[in-house]
Image (cartoon, rainbow, N blue to C red):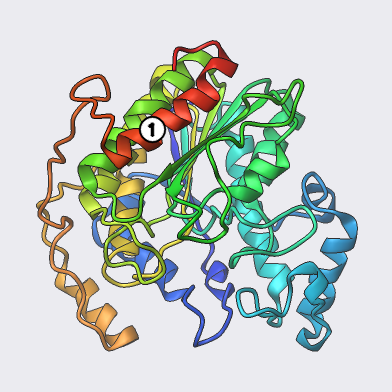
Amino acid sequence: MSGRTLLMWDEAVTEYDFGPEHPMDPVRLALTMSLVRSFGLDQAVDVTAAKPAGDSTLRLVHREDYVAAVRAASEDPRHADQAYGLGTVDDPAFAGMHEVSSLIAGQSVAAAEALWRGEAAHAVNFAGGLHHAMPGAASGFCIYNDASLAIARLLELGAERVAYVDVDVHHGDGVQAAFWEDPRVLTVSLHEHPRTLFPHTGWPEETGADGPGEGGAVNLALPAGTGDAGWVRAFHAIVPELLAEFRPQVLVTQHGADTHFEDPLAHMAVSLDAQRAVQEACHGLAHEYADGRWLALGGGGYAVVDVVPRSWTHLVGIAAHAPVDPASAIPESWRDEVYARTMQPGPRRMTDGRWPVDFREWTAGYDPADRLDQAVRATRRAAFPLRGLLA
C-alpha cells in the first residue's frame, strides 16, 4: 500500500451554494483550502480532483427517479419537486445543483477507490460528509450522500467490512438508512440527542434491521450541552471496542464541525481542541484496525470563519502525518483573506486554549447519575450484546 495521503479538491465544489441566506455558506470550503495552503499542507498531500459521479454510481445508493428529479431541478429550479425534498427551506433548488452535488460525490468515491486499490493510505474530502441525503430524497442540506456512495463503491469492489463513524452533531441518518440491512457495514453515530435536534432520529434502540443487519447500527445520543471531556470520553467508551470487534477493512469517518460551542444550529459545548483529539483518535484507530485505510470527510459546520477552516485544517494535517501544532499562530495573510471575503475578523490561533483535552476513561469514575454516563450505558446495552460485546 502507498503511504500517500490524498486531499480531494476541486474549486468547483464551492458552487454547492443554496443562496446568501442559507447557513451552509460555501465560503467555509474556500477558507479551509486557503488555510491548508497557508500552513503548507498542500505540499504534504497529493491534491487531487476527480470526475463527478455518473448516474450508474449515483444509483448505487439513490433511486433513478430521485436522480432525475435532481437533474430537472438543477436545469430549472422552478421544477423542484418537494416530494423529493427539493425546493424546501433546508434544500432550496439552484441551477447546477446536480452537477456540483455529483462532483462532491465523485471526490469521495474516487478517494475510496484509491484506498481500496492501495494507491493511498489516507484520503480527505472535507467538502463531503453530506450524510442526511436519503436514497429517494434530499434532506438536511444534503442532495447526494457521498459517504454512502463511497461505502457502496467499496462493497462493489469487494470489501466485506466497512466501518462508518460519524461525529457530526446531527445523526448520520442517511448513511444508517442506506446500510440498515447490510451486515458488511457498521455505522456508528455520536450526536446530540434527537429530542433536541434534527433529524430527531438516532436513538440507542436503532440497531439495524432484524436478521443479518441486527447490530449493524450503533447510536449514542448525547445530552445537549455536552462539553469536551464528556464528548471525548463518550467516543472512547464505544468506538474502539466496536472497531476491535468488527475489524473493518476501511474506516470512513465524518467530521462535522457543528459540535462546536460557537455553532449556531446546535447545542453542544465542544471545542476545536476536542474535535482535534477525536480526529487524532480516528487516525490511530484506522492504523490499528483498518490497515491504515482511512477516508475522512467533512460534514456540517456553520461557524464558517472561526471554526470550520481550523477544524478541517487540523484534519488534513493529521491525515498527512504533518499535524498542525494547536499553539500555532494563524498567518496574517489568511486573516486578511477572511476579512476581504466576509468582513469578519479571523481567529488568531489553531486552538481554543483547551489543548490537551483532559478526559476520564470510560472504566474510571462511572457515575450512574450522570446524564452522559446514562447515554453511554443506554447505547452499550442496546447495541453491544448484538455484537457479542459486554454492555
Measuring from the top left, give residue 9's x and y in whole percent. Answer: 50, 58
Task: Say which quarter of the image contains residue 133.
Answer: bottom right
Q: Is residue 334 left or right of residue 192?
A: left
Left or right of 298 on screen, residue 335: left
Position above or below: 339 against 240: below
Relative image position of residue 226 (x, y in whole percent):
29, 50
Residue 280 visible, this angle: no
Instruction: Identify the image quadrant of residue 322.
Output: top left
Does 140 sit left or right of 88 as displayed?
left
Point out the residue furthest to the right here.
65
Asked whether 30 or 175 is in front, the reply is 175
- Please report the residue visible at 24 percent of the width from the left and 56 percent of the height from the top: 39
Residue 169 percent coordinates (x, y): 43, 54
What's the amino acid at mark 1?
Answer: Val
Which residue, given by chain and number where applicable, does mark 1 sit on?
376
Whether residue 167 is situated above or below residue 104 in the rendered picture: above
Judged from the image, the secondary structure of the residue bearing numbered disc 1 is helix
How far across and how far down the image is residue 287, in percent? 40, 22
Q: Residue at x 34, y 47 (%)?
A: 315
Image quadrant occupied by the C terminus:
top left
Tell me: 29 left or right of 337: right
